[in-house]
Image (cartoon, helix red, strand yellow):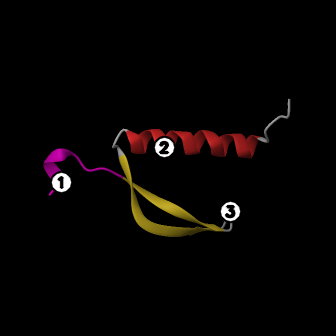
């Protein structure tokens, strides 16, 4: 069995967590992208869904 490099494994775990939070309706994709110097790529900007009393 091939071992997954730590960075790749951490990325997969983070990606899974983001998908779970999105499915639960706790975060949403803002439609914005932000440049990451570390990864040299654009990253999706996520935001917390505001509480019901703050939503319009």
Which residue is labeled 3 in the image?
Answer: 39
- Residue 3, position as x, y percentages in the image: 83, 34
Question: How many marks are shown on the rendered structure?
Answer: 3
Query: Of the residues under marks 2 and 1, which one precedes in the sequence?
Result: 2
Foreground tag (2 vs 1): 2
- Outermost residue toward the top? 1
What residue do we see at 36% from left, 38% from top? 24
User: Callout 2: 10 Å neighbours few (<14), some, many (20+)?
Assistant: few
Mark 1 to mark 3 CA distance (whole Å): 34 Å
Mark 3 to mark 2 CA distance (whole Å): 20 Å
- Residue 4, position as x, y percentages in the image: 79, 38
User: Callout 1: 10 Å neighbours few (<14), some, many (20+)?
Assistant: few
Which residue is labeled 2 in the image?
Answer: 19
20 displayed left or right of 50: right
What residue do we see at 14% from left, 58% from top? 56
52 displayed left or right of 11: left
Query: Of the residues under marks 1 and 3, which one precedes in the sequence?
Result: 3
- Outermost residue toward the right? 1
User: Callout 3: 10 Å neighbours few (<14), some, many (20+)?
Assistant: few
Q: Observer-nearest residue: 15 or 51?
A: 15
Q: Observer-nearest residue: 16 or 49?
A: 16
Query: Of the residues under marks 3 and 2, which one precedes in the sequence?
Result: 2
Give the magenta range. 48-56
């Amino acid at each position: 069995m091939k071992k997954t490099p730590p960075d790749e494994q951490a990325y997969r775990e983070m990606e899974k967590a983001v998908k779970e939070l999105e499915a639960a309706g706790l975060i949403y994709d803002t439609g914005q992208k932000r440049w990451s110097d570390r990864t040299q790529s654009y990253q999706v900007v996520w935001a917390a869904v505001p509480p019901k009393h703050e939503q319009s």
